[in-house]
Structures are given as C-alpha cells and as structure tokens.
Image (spheres, rainbow, N blue to C red):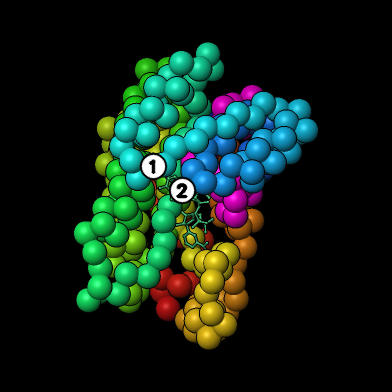
Amino acid sequence: MKIKGSTVLITGAARRVGREIALAMARAGAHVIVHYRNSQKEAKRLAAEIQSLGVKASLIKADLSQIRQVHRLLTTISKRSSPIDVLINNASVFYRTPLQNVTEKQWDEIFNTNLRAPFFLSRDIGLRMKKAGKGKIINIADWSGLRPYSGYIPYCLSKGALMTMTQALARDLAPEVQVVAVAPGPVMWPEGLGEKEKRTVIEKTPLRRLGSPKDVVETVRFLVEGSDFMTGSTIFVDGGRLIA
Ligand SMILES: NC(=O)c1ccc[n+]([C@@H]2O[C@H](COP(=O)([O-])OP(=O)(O)OC[C@H]3O[C@@H](n4cnc5c(N)ncnc54)[C@H](OP(=O)(O)O)[C@@H]3O)[C@@H](O)[C@H]2O)c1
C-alpha cells in the first residue's frame, strides 16, 4: 500500500516511539491522526510539525483503558470524510507488577489498554477497511510476549495475546486487510529505569546495545509499503533478545 496520500491513525503518538512513527508516516506523505491521552502539549507540537511537512494532521484524545472512550473515539473517526487506511496500535502501559503484589486494578488497566482497546479499534476500523476493499493494521507488541521476563506478567501476557490477536484478525479480515505486528526489543529506555537495570538488559541482548525507535519505524514503513503479501506475521526487532 502506498503511504503517500493515505490516512494513518497512530495510538499513543504524542511521544517516544509513537511520535517517530507518526513523523515517518508524515514525511512519506501520509495524513496523520495523532491519538494521545495525557500528552496534549506534545501532541499539539507534533501536529504542527506534521502540518509543516505539507500533510494533514488531526488530534484525538482518549483514555484507551476506558471502553466508553474507545467507543467515543470510534464514533468520531467514523464521521470523518476520509477513511482510515492504516491503523497502528502503539499505545501501551508498561510497569512492574511483581507476582506477589499484582492487583486486579493493574491487571485490568494493562489488559484494557494493551489488548482490549487494540481489539475493538481493529475490529471496527478493520471491518470498515474490509468494506472499502483495503487497509492495514499494525500492532506494536513486544518480544517478551513470547518469552516473558520476571516481574511483568500481565504486560507480557497482554503482548503475547496481541500477537495471537494479530493472527486471528488477519484470518477474519483477509483478503482485503492485512494485519501484522512488530515485536521490539529494547529500543528506548522506559522512563526512570536505573543504570544497573539498563546494564542487565544490554548484557542479555545478543547485539549488546540498545536499538533505536528508527528500527521500529523502518519496520513499520516496510509493513505498510514494502509488501502486501504479509498477514498474521510478527517481525521481531529485538537485537536477538528472544533467542538469548
Ligand atoms: N520502548 C521500548 O524499548 C519498547 C520495547 C518493546 C516494546 N515496545 C512497545 O512499543 C510501543 C511504543 O513504546 P514506547 O516506549 O514509546 O511506549 P510508552 O512510552 O510506554 O507509551 C506510549 C504511549 O501510550 C499512551 N498510553 C498509555 N496508556 C494509555 C491509555 N490508557 N490510553 C491511551 N493512551 C495510553 C501514552 O500516551 P500519553 O503520553 O498521551 O498519555 C504514551 O505516551 C509500545 O506498544 C511498547 O509496548 C517498546
């Protein structure tokens, strides 16, 4: 699918990896819908930057852990004159949940944001894409969805299920819509991670370094534009974390 002239919705796009994906799509000529939750200032700055590239940018705010807000977002999107060609489910919550302390509230927040919201967004937007005859859905997962690490069980489970969801939706939305996933390894340190933890992560990464958001961005670009013959697949961009 050509990126130029398409309309791309990216969740959690105001900062960090999502922001880089949004800018790359805009540079390639896409009109971008920037979804955000709390990062309004950053989202507005990004929208201005995107518009300065000569393409359209619009903003949409929603707390994706709240199902009513997911449906409100979908209603707003459905009223747009130009349909969504590419949906990128990037927004996610990530924090430590040691086994003995995991609460139901944390479980719900993590699953509702990382899995339930991508499911309902993909279902509604995906069915509309199917009707229109084309579309792509890209889920940003995590290598740890296949090989969970300690202290983050709900997060790892949510990302594992996101990869399974990618396969399930790919079947149901075929042949018009392709559904694929990217599973990054460490590409940007979570805010507040200590130096010792960073060293441990690098030691456990066969390529012995932190990747960069660009590694994810280039993979997303490939998945949108490079091949229309992939569906249900997950590409690991993880410095070898999975095989370590
Ligand atoms: N960073 C890495 O090295 C790495 C490694 C493996 C996988 N990944 C995956 O790659 C993606 C991007 O990573 P990242 O580090 O850039 O992510 P991030 O900073 O942890 O989160 C991205 C955005 O998600 C949004 N978000 C969180 N909870 C939300 C909610 N309830 N409703 C709506 N939006 C919500 C936030 O938006 P606001 O700021 O607007 O609130 C946040 O800016 C994520 O899916 C992550 O799991 C990243």
Residue 76 x %, y %: 45, 22
Q: Considering only vertical position in the picture, is 49 above or below 96?
A: above
Q: Are marks 1 and 2 in contact (CB under 8 Å)?
A: yes
Residue at 43 percent across and 19 percent down: it is 78
User: Going from the N terminus, do you reach mark 1 or mark 2 first?
Assistant: 1
In which quadrant is the C terminus drawn? bottom left
Q: Where is mark 2, residue-wise?
A: 91
Residue 3 in magenta? yes
Pick whichever, 50 or 45, lies toward us: 45
Indicate the quadrant containing the N terminus: top left, top right, bottom left or bottom right: top right
In the rendering, at what x and y percent does residue 11 appear? 49, 41
Q: Which residue is more in the foreground, 19 or 107?
A: 107
Q: Amino acid at mark 2?
A: Ala
The number of callouts visible is 2
The response on whether ligand 1 sits within 8 Å of label 2 is yes
Does residue 189 appear in this view? yes
Tell me: is circle 1 under 8 Å from ligand 1. yes
Task: Point out the residue furthest to the top here.
Answer: 81
Q: Residue at x 44, y 37 (%)?
A: 62
Q: Position of residue 178 (x, y in %)?
A: 41, 35
Q: CA distance from mark 1 to mark 2?
A: 8 Å
Residue depicted at 29% across the width and 67% down the height: 153
Disc sitting over residue 146 in the figure:
none
User: Mark on residue 64?
Assistant: 1
Q: Which residues are magenta?
A: 2-21
